[in-house]
Image (cartoon, grey):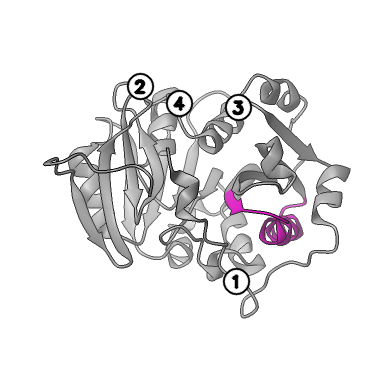
């Protein structure tokens, strides 16, 4: 990637099944970045867990802020630096959270060098995200307010975590008004994102898409946040919130989501693909 390691500086590292995870001080923000195989995956500000530096994470935080006041029950698929669990623990004390992460060395690295807030109820389970859904306590089914799917192996979401069957398993945890948040990365043409939108909407019919304008138009590679629910979401606040930043931003909902999907069909087990891999030049500073 474009950023160079400073001479004679050793950053904390862990060897994962698909490469190296590293924690470095953020160059242009306070806090730290978790970098896997050259791809920045998380930003963590230990002094201010509400500081969400990555734009797509800030959009996730904006959706979470609109859930009813008070503690929530949340399940996170993919740990990274556990930025969103920290955010929820800070903004909604007393929340109960479960995190599923395949790479135990990553969890150990983050726990040692970016410790979780004291007293936060955040349980981390080791294993594949989809298998982890099946192992959730029966009492959680139908009682979870928020499921966040942000799973990457290197810079790609594995195919088995992109299908209608996978999203049904996630949706089974949600309350009738619970929200699924999905981080979808795609580039020109948005073929993968359109198929993912069709897939999520086939399971949870109320879908909103939040993204930077040029990303939503398919003009450059970037992240789109899908917010989906079995019930109509109170999204009247979203256009005003998106106008406030990060800039420039847009939300698609209703008929605009249908136009975004176009003729794309839902992905199913046995006929799904991993998300496209971005060029490392995307992360040059």
Q: Residue at x 68, y 26 (%)?
A: 242
Disc 2 vs disc 4: which is toward the camera? 2
Disc 1 vs disc 4: which is toward the camera? 1
Q: Secondary structure at mark 4?
A: loop
Q: Residue at x 49, y 61 (%)?
A: 156
Looking at the image, residue 281 sits to the left or right of residue 114; the answer is right
Q: CA distance from mark 1 to mark 4?
A: 36 Å
| Residue found at the very far left of the displayed protein | 8
Verify whether residue 189 appears in magenta.
yes
Tell me, for residue 273, which label it has, or none: 1
Q: Earlier in the sequence, mark 4 or mark 3?
A: 3
Tell me, for residue 48, which label it has, or none: 2
Q: CA distance from mark 2 to mark 1?
A: 37 Å
Q: Is residue 202 above or below residue 229?
A: below
**Most foreground residue, 78 or 282:** 282
Tell me, for residue 92, which label it has, or none: 4
Q: CA distance from mark 2 to mark 3?
A: 22 Å
Q: Secondary structure at mark 1?
A: loop
Q: Earlier in the sequence, mark 2 or mark 4?
A: 2
Which percent across, then down, holds residue 1?
Answer: 38, 49
Q: Earlier in the sequence, mark 1 or mark 3?
A: 3
Looking at the image, residue 117 sits to the left or right of residue 198; the answer is left
Bin the neighbour count of mark 1 within 10 Å (Cα to Cα): few under 14, some 14-19, many 20 and up: some
Q: Is residue 161 above or below residue 188?
A: below
Q: Which residue is mark 3?
A: 68
Residue 1 in sight from this viewpoint: yes
Q: Residue at x 71, y 49 (%)?
A: 218
């Amino acid at each position: 990637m474009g950023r160079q390691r400073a001479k004679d500086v050793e950053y904390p590292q862990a060897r994962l099944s698909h490469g190296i995870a590293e924690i470095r001080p953020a160059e242009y923000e306070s806090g730290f970045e978790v970098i896997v195989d050259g791809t920045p995956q998380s930003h963590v500000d230990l002094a201010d867990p509400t500081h969400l530096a990555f734009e797509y994470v800030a959009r996730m935080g904006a959706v979470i802020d609109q859930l009813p006041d008070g503690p929530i029950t949340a399940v996170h698929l993919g740990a990274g630096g556990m930025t969103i669990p920290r955010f929820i623990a800070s903004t909604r004390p007393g929340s109960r959270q479960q995190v599923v992460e395949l790479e135990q060395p990553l969890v150990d690295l983050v726990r040692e060098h970016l410790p979780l807030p004291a007293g936060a109820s955040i349980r981390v389970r080791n294993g594949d995200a989809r298998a982890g859904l099946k192992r959730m306590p029966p009492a959680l089914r139908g009682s979870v307010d928020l499921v966040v799917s942000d799973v990457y192996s290197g810079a790609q979401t594995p195919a088995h975590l992109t299908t209608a069957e996978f999203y049904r398993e996630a949706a089974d945890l949600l309350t009738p008004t619970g929200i699924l948040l999905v981080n979808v990365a795609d580039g020109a043409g948005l073929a993968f994102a359109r198929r993912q939108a069709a897939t999520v909407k086939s399971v949870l019919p109320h879908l909103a898409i939040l993204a930077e304008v040029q990303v939503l138009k398919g003009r450059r590679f970037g992240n789109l946040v899908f917010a989906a629910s079995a019930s109509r979401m109170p999204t009247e606040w979203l256009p005003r919130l998106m106008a406030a930043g990060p800039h420039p931003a847009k939300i698609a909902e209703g008929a605009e989501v249908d136009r975004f999907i176009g003729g794309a069909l839902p992905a199913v087990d046995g006929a799904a693909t991993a998300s496209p891999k971005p060029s490392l030049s995307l992360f040059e500073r």
